[in-house]
Amino acid sequence: MHQTFDAALEINLLHANQTGADHNRSHFDEWGITCLNLMSSPGAGKTVLLERTLAGLKTQFKMAVIEGDMTTQLDAERLRQFGVPVIAINTGRSCHLDSKMVAGGIHQFSHQYNPAEFDLVWVENVGNLVCPAEFEVGEHAKVALLSVTEGEDKPLKYPIMFQAADCLLITKMDLAPYLNIDLKKIESNVRQMNPRVTIIPVSAQTGEGLETWFQWVENSIKAEV
């Protein structure tokens, strides 16, 4: 009985969240904005990737960020230096952003700016390898990051995020020569979980793979126009 109740509660929570995510997406569609949801474990490189991406695409697209963190605005402050709107959301004890939290961010964004002037909204989710993938927030695509320092087995141990991802960035490639890591094994494990996912090895430090990543982002924006 207890298990049945827990399962029903989880289904109700996910259903309510999905309804909110669909509502958020309808706002983005109305404004002509593409929304991309960045997900990874803590320390995989989401914020530094965003820094490089904001710098690399700022002349092509008008962008904003909804920044999720449990307690601080440290990452939000880093991103504001690039001259883009950054809406910070502190989740408290929650290990992920949900559609209701992001709806609050969208509300702030739409009251401070004219959303119709923007091309792309980034959602930087809370660092966690499980929960962010289960709770849609209204994004058009999910981007997962996996750093070479995390090992080859993470896609098998934490399959949900990799199954849900439309694009996977293998980050910190500049460290790969110093690690006992098999890149082909990582890709093979990811493909077991998600054969269709686009895989792009990148390094925010050296710039490896960033042009390929930028092209993927550009194609994602065009696909939603």
Image (cartoon, rainbow, N blue to C red):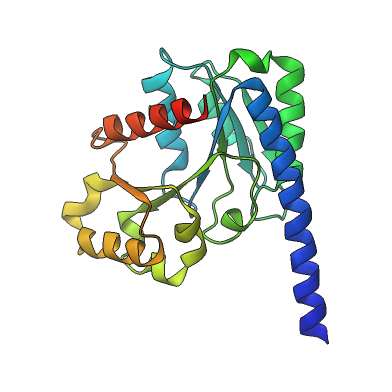
- Residue 137 is drawn in which quadrant? top right
- Residue 216 is drawn in which quadrant? top left
- Residue 67: image x %, image y %? 61, 36
In the rendered image, is residue 92 in sight?
A: no
The total of numbered circles placed on residues is 0
Which residue is drawn at the image coordinates 75% and 36% (left, top)? 103
Which residue is drawn at the image coordinates 35% and 29% (left, top)? 214
Residue 195, above or below 87: below
Say which quadrant the N terminus sits in.
bottom right
Q: Closest to the observer: 178 or 124?
A: 124
- Residue 222: image x %, image y %? 45, 25
Horizontally, residue 128 falls left or right of residue 26, namely left
Which residue is drawn at the image coordinates 79% and 72% (left, top)? 8
In the rendered image, is residue 18 in sight?
A: yes
Residue 187, above or below 79: below
Furthest toward the bottom, the residue is: 1
- Residue 161: image x %, image y %? 50, 58
Q: Closest to the observer: 143 or 180?
A: 143
Which residue is drawn at the image coordinates 27% and 64% (left, top)? 188
- Residue 130: image x %, image y %? 56, 61
Horizontally, residue 49 falls left or right of residue 207, namely right
